[in-house]
Amino acid sequence: MITITKQQARQFILLKQGLIGTYRFTGKAGALAYVRQAGCIQYDPVDVCGKNAELTLWSRVRGFRKDMLRELLYEDRLLVDYPDKELSIWPTEDWPYFSSYRERSRRLGETFDGLKGLREQAIAYIDQYGPVSSDSLPVEGEIFWHSSMHWSGNWDKLSPAARSVLEQLYTDGELIIHHKQGSRKYYDLAEKHIPSEFLEAENPCGDEESFLSWRVLRRIGAVGLLWDKSSAAFLGIRMNTETRKAILARLTEEGILRSVTVEGINTPFYYLAEDEPLMRQILEGSADRKPRMTFIAPLDPLMWDKSLIQSLWDFQYAWEIYTPVSKRKYGYYTLPILYGERFVGRIETAADRKEQILRVKGLWWEPGVRQTKKLEAALDRTLESFCRFNECKKITRPSGTAE
């Protein structure tokens, strides 16, 4: 087992994720390529300065626009909204792998009194009239319903019947999200939009252990390096410590994973064997590490394991959106600022789309960061790009001066 420095670990992760060096992802094709590499990116409906999935792509994909993701999801149908790491966006071609989850959802649905009739009613209506939301599906009343939306378990509540049956059919795989208007979801029959080659394909994972292993590999590939710990990067994968260790050991023995130690950290790390050439470049010092500045989304794959970020970067980040105002240290929707291989600060912005102004509400540099002309120039360039991404025409700083 080789040993690398923390700096080399940081470089490996950032290069793998396409956050330093020459841009590896460009345009809509690049957005698709990145999602395929990451396996999934998390969806969150909050839109202060772009939704989480859009921010994740903007930080890596040269020339990314928000409509590119919409097209990939709802026109090209190359990506799909579906649970994975919470509600996520992932490649449609991965549909067969999640058949066991859909089967579990269907079995759960059979335990609901009266749901069968509602299912048939909803499917017939959607088949005749097209996409619906919970407000437009003519199903009235409430049912006591335990959702299977969350991989970590189920929860019970009295819920409007229309919403319950749509979400049940969605997790069953009968429906997909056809499109969204704001945060409102419109559903349509999956068979109308997902190619039959994926709908009818057998699950490539022959058993649950194979499925767990496939998902663990995807998460490691998304981050680049993951340690053998209970990690938020594995959120949604139903496994305990013993199972995780067994999977990591077996995949390493089979040559699918490589293990490495990081100086100063006792826990072993793992990376995909297919990334061995990148590790060699890191060790040889020949990797393209051209620095650039970007803002990182709160639920970005880079930030999935905040303990790992603190251990490798000595950077502590908390998403304060659910923190009471009086207890916030920074701001409601504060984004880490990555510059080259370092987290140099954090920024809070808000896009005023009516006035077409990107407002910088707060900017905090990390201790020890020198505010040089080079740093300020990089920030100006990044804000200009972020302004265009948010379809704004000017930027205002806390002083109120426009740029």
Image (cartoon, grey):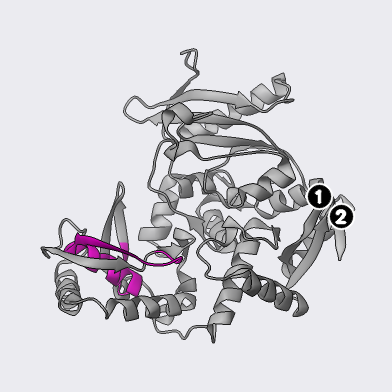
Q: Which residue is drawn at 44% across and 53% down?
A: 43
Where is residue 273? Give x, y as percent: 75, 69
Where is residue 158? Give x, y as percent: 21, 61
Q: What residue type is labelled 1?
A: Gln
Which residue is tagged 2?
283
Q: Which sits earlier in the primary sequence, circle 2 or circle 1?
A: 1
Quadrant (top left, top right, bottom left, bottom right) of the N terminus: bottom right
Q: Which amino acid does label 2 sit on?
A: Leu
Q: Please name which of the two marks, 2 or 1, marks the residue nearer to the observer.
A: 1
Image: 151 above or below 233: below
Q: Which mark is residue 8?
A: 1
Left or right: where 169 falls relative to 337: left
Q: Is there CB contact under 8 Å for labels 2 and 1?
A: yes
Left or right: where 216 falls relative to 161: right
Image: 1 above or below 225: below
Distance between the Cα atoms at labels 2 and 1? 7 Å
The residue nearer to you, when weighing 391 against 165, is: 165
Q: Residue at x 22, y 63 (%)?
A: 131
